[in-house]
Amino acid sequence: LGGSGRAKSVWNEMRQGIEPLSLESSISFRTREALEIMQKKKFVPATTEKASVAKDGTTKLLVRLDDGLGVETVLIPHASLPRTTLCVSTQVGCDRGCNFCATGTLGLTRNLTASEIAAQFFLALEYLRKENVPQNSKKPLSNVVMMGMGDAGINCINAAQAAAILTDQERFGLAKSKCTISTVGPSPEAFMALAVAPCMLAWSLHSPNDELRRLLVPTHTIYSTVQLRQALIDALLTRPAARSRTLMVAATLIAGINDSDDDARHLAHFVGPLVDACVKLNVDLIPVNPVAHAPHFHRPSTQRLRAFAHVVKLHEPRVHVALRVTRGDDENAACGQLLVADSHSRLHRQNLRRLSSSHALPGTGEVITRTTSTS
C-alpha cells in the first residue's frame, strides 16, 4: 500500500467493523487509491445477508461469500458476564457426517479461505456497530471459536492462517488464549498441522469408545481414539509455550446413547494421558440440540448431565468440567444446528436420504440403542 501507516489505517477501520473501501471509511485518498489499483472493489470477501436474533440474544448471521455460497456464524453473548463469543465456520458444508449435526447433512462443497474465515469476525463487528448492540467490554468480541459449519481438521492450513490473522496484534488483535480451533480429529496429521496455529485446540471426541464413536461420527473409521489421542499428545508437546498446551475435549451427550455413568467413567479414564501432556484440560459437555433429520436424539435431563459431570470429575479430578448452556436454539443457532441448504440442496437431499435409512440413528435399529448404567 506504499507504507506501514496506510496498512495500519486499513486495519484500524477493520477493527471498528468498517469496510475500508466503503463511504464510511476514513482512510486517506492515497490509501484508497492504492487498494483500487490492486483491483479491490471491497476489502472483505463476504457480506452479511441476514441476521436472526434468538430470545437469549444469540445472533446468527447468514454470511454470503463472493462466489454466492453461504455459511453461518453465531454471536453468543454470555448470560451474565460482559463478553461475547463468536462461533465461525471453516467450510461450506461438512463431510464428517456426525449424525447429531445438521451441517453434516450438507456434505462438503469447499473449504473456506483464511480470509473468508477471518471475514466472519469483521462482519460480526460490523453487525454490532450498525445495530448499536450495547457492549460492556472494551472488546466487542472477546472470544472466537472455529466450531461452526465444517471441520477445521480438514482445512488445517486456512484455519491456522485465519487464527494468525485474528491474533495478530497489528490486525484483529485477539489474545491467543481467546481463539480456539476445534476438530473431530480426522487424522494424526491434522492434529500436527493445527499445532502450529497461534491459538488453543479443541477435540470433538463425543465418545472414546470406537464402536460408539463410529456410529456418532461415521467417518471415524481409520484411526482408533487411542491412536488419535497419542497424535494429539505428540502435537501438543511440539508447542513451546506451556500455556498453549491448554486443551478442550468436547462430548455431545445424547440421552440413552452416551450419557451413562459408565460412559462418564470411560471418558475420565481416557483423558488422563491428555491431562499429563497439558497445562490445563477442559471437558466440555454439550447437551444435544434438536435437528430435523434425527428426531429420536434427545437431551439428557439436567440431573443426568450433572451426574455425568460429577462422575468425570470424581474419576479424573485434574480436569475442569463444564456443562454447556444451550444458547440460540429457538433460531437454530445452537451447536449442531447450522444449516445453509440453498447452494447445495441436491447433495443435502441425498445425505438426508442416507441418514433416514441409516441404522446409526436411534430408534431405527438396535445397533446404537444402548442400555445405560447409572451405577
Image (tube, rainbow, N blue to C red):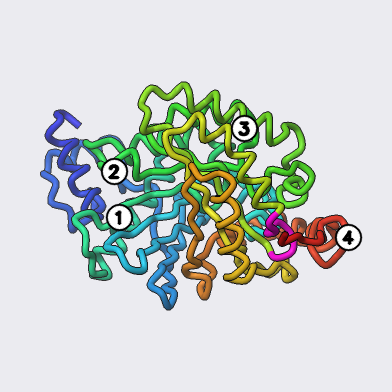
Magenta span includes 260:
yes
Picture disc at residue 366 = 4
Residue found at x 36% / y 68%: 79
CA distance for labels 1 and 2: 9 Å
Q: Sequence order check: which comes first, mark 4 or mark 2?
A: 2
Residue found at x 56% / y 64%: 306
Q: Is residue 245 left or right of residue 264?
A: left
Location of residue 230 with respect to 113 vertically, above or below: above
Q: Which residue is mark 2?
A: 174
CA distance for labels 4 and 3: 29 Å
Q: Secondary structure at mark 1?
A: loop
Q: Which residue is mark 3?
A: 229
Query: Which stretch appears magenta?
Result: 255-261
Q: How packed is label 2: few (under 14 Cα within 10 Å), some, or many (20 or more)?
A: many
Picture disc at residue 141 = 1
CA distance for labels 4 and 2: 47 Å
Q: Amino acid at mark 1?
A: Leu
